[in-house]
Image: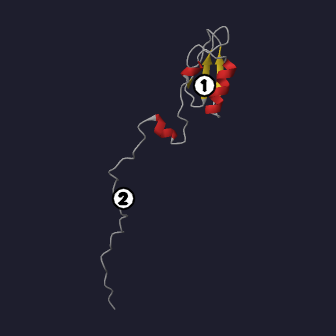
Amino acid sequence: MSEEKKPAEPPPQPQQEQPIESTPTLPRTYGQLLGPNAASIKTWPGLVGLTAEEAEKKIKEERPGAQVQVVPPNSFVTMDFRHNRVRLHVDFSGKVERPPNVG
């Protein structure tokens, strides 16, 4: 009895995936990141001259989730951006002295 030896077959190589040639599309503006449900009002120039309480009430009517901060005269504030914060800069009589905006 003679056994024939067969040449050893190399182990099968795993198939390599071809790299994808396209890159993902990223939003070009911050508004696209927030999506279509984002509130559109970001500044309130019509509130200048109102008291802080009146201005806060109008802002919360238009942006219910807004966190309103009243900033007294000559006060320091941080420079970080928060999409749900609105600062009311008031003068010594408690009236809004510049247009409030988101941030």
The percent coordinates of residue 31 (x first, y second) are 48, 36
Q: Nearer the viewer, mark 1 or mark 2?
A: 1
The percent coordinates of residue 50 (x first, y second) are 64, 17
Tag 1: amino acid: Val
Q: 13 above or below 5? A: above
- For the point 67% across and 26% down, which residue is it? 57
Q: Which residue is mark 1?
A: 86
- For the point 55% across and 36% down, which residue is it? 39
Left/right of residue 53 with respect to residue 38 in the rendered view:
right
The residue sitting at the bottom extreme is 1
Tag 2: amino acid: Glu
Which of pointers 1 and 2 lies earlier in the amino acid sequence? 2
Which quarter of the rendering shows the C terminus?
top right
Q: 21 above or below 57? A: below
The percent coordinates of residue 80 (x first, y second) are 55, 24
Question: Which one is in front, 18 or 50?
Answer: 50
Question: Which one is in front, 44 or 4?
Answer: 44
Q: What SS does tag 1 mark?
A: strand
Badge count: 2
Mark identifier at residue 17: 2
- For the point 49% across and 39% down, which residue is it? 33
Q: 88 above or below 1? A: above
The percent coordinates of residue 72 (x first, y second) are 65, 12
Q: CA distance from mark 1 to mark 2?
A: 50 Å
Q: What SS does tag 2 mark?
A: loop
The crowd level at tag 2 (other Cα within 10 Å; few <14, some 14-19, many 20+) is few
Corner quadrant of residue 69: top right
The crowd level at tag 1 (other Cα within 10 Å; few <14, some 14-19, many 20+) is many
Q: Is residue 79 visible?
A: no
